[in-house]
Amino acid sequence: GDSVTQMEGPVTLSEEAFLTINCTYTATGYPSLFWYVQYPGEGLQLLLKATKADDKGSNKGFEATYRKETTSFHLEKGSVQVSDSAVYFCALSDDGSGNTGKLIFGQGTTLQVKP
Amino acid sequence: GAGVSQTPSNKVTEKGKYVELRCDPISGHTALYWYRQSLGQGPEFLIYFQGTGAADDSGLPNDRFFAVRPEGSVSTLKIQRTERGDSAVYLCASSPDTNEQFFGPGTRLTVL
């Protein structure tokens, strides 16, 4: 079945460092891809998404490009801030028959940014 | 406007008991999803409603789990004969279509 694999955390960076969190997926169809973020004590929030190959999603300085050839959707940010400390989840939507939109998540990557 | 709300925020119960978890979606959202998140893991899909009907319940782990959405708005996830392995955070999400999902804060269930 469809699946998502993320790099294991925790990732610890200094403020203003460059961030990459790797995400690869396995899917039989043409899924949409998402990054969700969970800040401490808060619920899951959509960070960005891409719905087809070569699309780039971006939000709050974060970017990710849908790479069909490498089945990847890596999350990047040029300069992280302490406030970016959170757990990041890569996900794909089931685009098979029925078009339910149900999400399949990776295991999450914890990011800690130190001042 | 109000987001997705879930009650209770925390529920502690004893093994073998019955529990109900409630989800109030964003007004007007026809799609509603339940997920379960175990410690250190990503959320796992349980069930999807479109309107009042369960369009996909393939994620429910066994017949102890059941969910309803009788009027196409509020949904209740019901767990019978709870087991310690049911302990997790149960998340609800709603969507105006089947694209972006808006998540609630979750209910943390602990089975002693």
Image (cartoon, coloured by chain):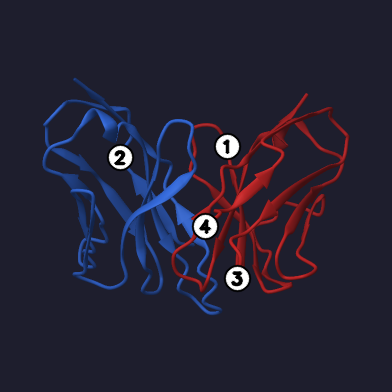
Residue B55 image point, x, y percent: 67, 73
Question: Does the residue at mark 4 contact the one at mark 1 (Cβ under 8 Å)?
Answer: no
Residue projecting furthest to the bottom: A97
Which residue is under mark 1? B38
Q: Nearer the viewer, residue B33 or B44?
A: B33
Query: Mark 4 sits on what residue?
Result: B1
Query: Is the Cβ of the residue at disc 4 closer than 8 Å to that at disc 3?
Result: no
CB contact under 8 Å: marks 3 and 1: no
Residue tagged by mark 2?
Answer: A7
- The CA distance from mark 4 to mark 3 is 12 Å
Same-chain status of marks 3 and 2: no
Q: Which mark is residue A108?
A: none
Amino acid tagged 1: Ser
> Which chain appears red?
B
Tags 2 and 1 both on a single chain:
no
Q: Locate residue A32, reporting x and y percent.
A: 36, 68
**Subunit of label 4:** B
Residue located at (25% from left, 45% from top)? A22
For the residues bearing labels 2 and 4, Cβ distance under 8 angstroms: no
Q: Is residue B100 visible?
A: yes
Q: Are discs 2 and 1 less than 8 Å apart at CB? A: no
Q: Residue at x 47, y 56 (%)?
A: A104
